[in-house]
């Protein structure tokens, strides 16, 4: 069978090289791609396949033994051109029993390899640039700390002097701004260290209950001031002392609790810590932070743990924040060998839970050998960490017109007006959020008054607030 340029096979114009040869290796057909790549004219037919692939195909006593190759993918073959230069190919060999012919289909992988190398190079460059950027961010944020702390130091010195009310108010405001700035600097610093892989945990022995008390003390005022319930429970199965990075556990809990408090106006916040597993001297702890706040849409859950991600722009405008907290928490939890998850329902609340592995201190084993010790807690808590009875009570508070709702509304309004009288507009706005939630289902007239009250508070207009407050009280 002598096939040449005039061949009418559709394979003639195929992108891969196609060569047909007999049992002696003699090529009887080469398609256009093969002729071009191997730089032959019409003289490829008649050549031997061993001239093209001398490293792989050999003739032994005029006998061409290829059966081992047939059907399989042949990687890293070297194809030789007419001028004896070569290039790498990937090939496949087929045999046709009837005509006793072989067909070799080969692809030039030089370009593919070149592209792969280019991709690797670009990837490496991007990683290097990322590292430089992270180091730059880390340096700059570190440098920012000095002036902020300088302002804070001077501020404290100033506060010790006798000052008029207005100056004290301004100084307090500056102090709060500095504290906020420090929080942002610390978040960016942690984030860039984690991104650059330069973050390491510092485990040491500490008292677990003392740590939880400290976390509780950090948040109790802000939470209860908002009129929310706050409950912290620690399983007795957790020993007094453990070995872990206390500072970082506190950081994760602080972040989750700050969010819970930020996004909740009605109901309660709960924290639960339990022991879920033990292997030798390592123990898994499981934390659950639940709130009955604004909740998160199913579709937004994936975004939560990404860096700089806030659910939507209106949330960031209203509640502030950098969108780094949950990403840092996730990375810290993973460094501690655990996982962080969220369950949430819009307008019902959110439950963030995370696990970490810690070391058990010597001598604490006795505490751990109690019955039911190994009970895992997954599924033991309802999605919101709220029992059906409690959920009903919460529904009652939210439902306009119920006793619980009215009581809560009046209590919140009286706190609100007190804040206005003390010119604490920010806190008044916070209570306004609660009033808005509690009157979500109220008649239009009440809702309009609530809206006007909210606008008056935002404009810090005492007289207007007073008028709308009285109007609302009458309507209620
Ligand atoms: P930020 O510092 O901006 O709060 P986070 O990473 O801690 O950043 O949170 C990212 C976003 O996740 C928040 O802006 C908010 O939209 C959402 N979120 C976090 N916690 C809660 C919660 N308990 N309830 C509702 N939304 C939440």
Image (tube, rainbow, N blue to C red):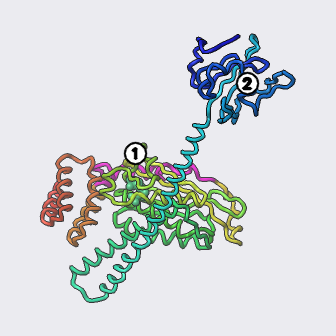
Q: Which residue is mark 2?
A: 49
Point 84% across, 21% down: residue: 63
Q: Any mark on residue 21, and which?
A: none
The answer to which of 390 and 73 lies nearer the viewer is 73
Q: Is residue 260 visible?
A: no
List x then y, in percent, for residue 152: 35, 79
List x then y, in percent, for residue 66: 79, 24
The answer to which of 255 and 438 lies nearer the viewer is 255
List x then y, in percent, for residue 350: 44, 52
Is the residue 54 above or below the residue 214 in the image?
above
Q: Is mark 1 within 8 Å of ligand 1?
A: no
Q: Which residue is mark 1?
A: 297
Is the residue 106 above or below the residue 415 in the image?
above
Which stretch did the figure color magenta? 376-405
The tag earlier along the polypeptide, 2 or 1, is: 2
Q: CA distance from mark 2 to mark 1?
A: 64 Å
Which of labels 2 and 1 is toward the front?
Answer: 2
List x then y, in percent, for residue 277: 65, 57
Magenta stretch encompasses residue 354: no
Is the residue 3 above or below the residue 277 in the image?
above
Which quadrant: the N terminus?
A: top right
Determine the secondary structure under disc 1. Answer: loop
Q: Quadrant of ligand 1?
A: bottom left
Asked if disc 2 and disc 1 are in contact, CB closer than 8 Å, the reply is: no
Point 63% across, 28% down: residue: 38
Q: Is residue 265 visible?
A: yes
Point 72% across, 30% down: residue: 53
């Amino acid at each position: 069978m002598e096939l040449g340029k005039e061949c009418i096979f559709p394979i003639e114009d195929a992108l891969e090289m196609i060569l047909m040869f007999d049992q002696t290796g003699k090529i009887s057909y080469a398609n256009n791609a093969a002729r071009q790549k191997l730089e032959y004219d019409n003289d490829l037919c008649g050549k031997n396949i061993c001239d093209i692939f001398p490293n792989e195909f050999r003739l032994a006593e005029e006998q061409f033994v290829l059966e081992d190759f047939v059907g399989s993918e042949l990687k890293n073959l070297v194809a030789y051109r007419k001028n004896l230069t070569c290039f790498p190919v990937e090939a496949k060999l087929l045999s046709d029993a009837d005509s006793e012919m072989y067909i070799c289909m080969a692809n030039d992988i030089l370009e593919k390899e070149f592209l792969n190398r280019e991709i690797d190079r670009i990837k490496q460059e991007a990683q290097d640039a990322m590292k430089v950027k992270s180091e730059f961010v880390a340096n700059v944020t570190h440098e920012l700390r000095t002036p902020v702390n300088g302002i804070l130091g001077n501020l404290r010195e100033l506060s010790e002097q006798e000052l008029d009310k207005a100056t004290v108010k301004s100084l307090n405001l500056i102090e709060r701004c500095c504290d906020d700035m420090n929080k942002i600097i610390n978040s960016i610093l942690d984030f860039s260290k984690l991104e650059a892989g330069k973050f390491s945990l510092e485990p040491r022995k500490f008292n677990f209950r003392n740590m939880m008390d400290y976390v509780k003390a950090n948040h109790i005022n802000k939470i209860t001031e908002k009129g929310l319930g706050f409950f912290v429970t620690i399983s007795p199965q957790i020993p007094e002392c453990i070995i872990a990075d206390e500072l970082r556990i506190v950081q994760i809990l602080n972040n989750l609790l700050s969010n819970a408090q930020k996004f909740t106006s009605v109901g309660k916040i709960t924290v639960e810590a339990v022991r879920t597993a033990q292997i030798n001297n390592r123990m898994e702890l499981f934390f659950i932070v639940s709130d009955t706040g604004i909740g998160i849409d199913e579709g937004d859950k994936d975004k939560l743990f990404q860096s700089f991600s806030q659910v939507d722009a209106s949330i960031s405008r209203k509640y502030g924040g950098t969108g780094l907290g949950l990403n840092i928490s996730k990375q810290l939890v993973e460094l501690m060998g655990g996982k962080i998850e969220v369950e949430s329902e819009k307008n019902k609340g959110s439950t963030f839970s995370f696990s970490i592995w810690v070391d058990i201190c010597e001598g604490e084993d006795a505490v751990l050998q109690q019955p039911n010790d190994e009970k895992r807690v997954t599924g033991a808590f309802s999605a919101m960490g709220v029992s059906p009875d409690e959920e009903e009570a919460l529904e009652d508070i939210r439902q306009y017109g119920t006793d619980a709702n009215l009581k809560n509304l009046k209590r919140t309004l009286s706190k609100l007006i007190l804040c206005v009288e003390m010119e604490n507009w920010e806190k008044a706005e916070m209570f306004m959020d609660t009033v808005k939630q509690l009157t979500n289902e109220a008649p239009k007239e009440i809702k309009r008054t609530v809206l006007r009250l909210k606008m008056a508070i935002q404009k810090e207009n005492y007289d207007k607030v007073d008028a709308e407050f009285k109007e609302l009280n009458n309507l209620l």
